[in-house]
C-alpha cells in the first residue's frame, strides 16, 4: 500500500491541515458572527468571544500554512483548555462528556505543530525565497 497511496502522503497531510484549519475557523465565525447559524453566540469581550477570535485567526493561518506551527500549537492549547473547562467536569471520558471533538482537534493540531506546514503552504513557498546562510 505504501507504493500506491503512501507516495501521496505530503498531499494528504496538506489536505488534513487545510480542512482542519477551515473547520476550526468556522467555529470562530459561528461564535463571532453567527455564521453558520442564527446569531452570534458570544460577546467579543467574553471568554467565548476570545476563543472565537483564536479559532478564526488560527484556523485561517493553519489552512493557509502561514506560521503554521505556532498557530497549531496555540489552537491545540485552546482545545485542551476547552476540554478541561467545558467537558471534563461532567465525566472523564470524552465520548460521554461530548468532548471528543475538542480532544481530536487538540491532538491533530499538536501533530500539525510538530510536523510543520508541509506542501501547499505559504510557509513552504516562502522558504524558496528566504534562504538562511545555514541551509546553503
Image (cartoon, rainbow, N blue to C red):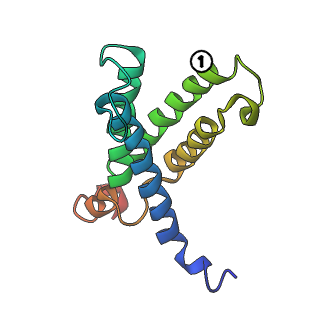
Q: Determine the residue positioned at 61% across, 80% down.
A: 5
Q: Considering only vertical position in the picture, is 33 above or below 23?
A: above
Q: Residue furthest left?
A: 129
- Quadrant, the N terminus: bottom right
Q: Residues within 10 Å of mark 1 (few under 14, many from 20)?
A: few
In front here: 2 or 36?
A: 36
Q: Considering only vertical position in the picture, is 119 above or below 57?
A: below
Q: Determine the residue positioned at 33% across, 27% down.
A: 40
Give the left or right position of residue 97, taking residue 110 as reference: right
Res. 31 image quadrant: top left
- Quadrant, the C terminus: bottom left
Residue 28 visible in the picture: yes
Give the left or right position of residue 2, taking residue 26 as reference: right
The residue singled out by tag 1 in the image is: 85
Q: Determine the residue positioned at 47% across, 51% down.
A: 20
Res. 55 image quadrant: top left
Where is residue 132? Give x, y as percent.
29, 55
Where is residue 7? Give x, y as percent.
56, 80
Give the left or right position of residue 50, taking residue 107 as reference: left
Number of dots carrying numbers:
1
Q: Residue furthest bottom?
A: 3
Q: Considering only vertical position in the picture, is 43 above or below 58?
A: above
Residue 67 visible in the picture: no
In front here: 8 or 88?
A: 88
Res. 46 image quadrant: top left
Q: Determine the residue positioned at 51% across, 68% down.
A: 12
Q: Secondary structure at mark 1?
A: helix
Q: Residue furthest front?
A: 38
Where is residue 35? Give x, y as percent.
32, 39
Where is residue 108? Give x, y as percent.
57, 47
Amino acid at each position: 500500500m505504501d507504493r500506491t497511496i503512501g507516495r501521496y502522503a505530503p498531499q494528504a497531510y496538506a489536505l488534513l491541515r487545510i480542512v482542519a484549519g477551515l473547520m476550526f475557523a468556522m467555529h470562530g465565525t459561528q461564535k463571532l458572527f453567527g455564521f453558520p447559524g442564527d446569531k452570534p453566540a458570544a460577546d467579543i469581550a467574553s471568554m467565548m468571544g476570545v476563543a472565537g477570535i483564536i479559532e478564526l485567526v488560527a484556523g485561517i493561518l493553519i489552512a493557509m500554512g502561514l506560521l503554521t506551527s505556532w498557530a497549531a500549537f496555540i489552537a491545540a492549547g485552546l482545545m485542551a483548555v476547552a476540554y478541561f473547562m467545558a467537558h471534563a467536569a461532567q465525566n472523564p471520558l470524552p465520548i460521554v462528556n461530548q468532548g471528543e471533538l475538542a480532544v481530536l482537534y487538540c491532538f491533530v493540531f499538536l501533530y500539525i505543530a510538530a510536523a510543520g506546514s508541509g506542501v501547499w503552504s505559504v510557509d513552504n513557498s516562502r522558504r524558496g525565497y528566504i534562504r538562511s546562510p545555514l541551509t546553503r
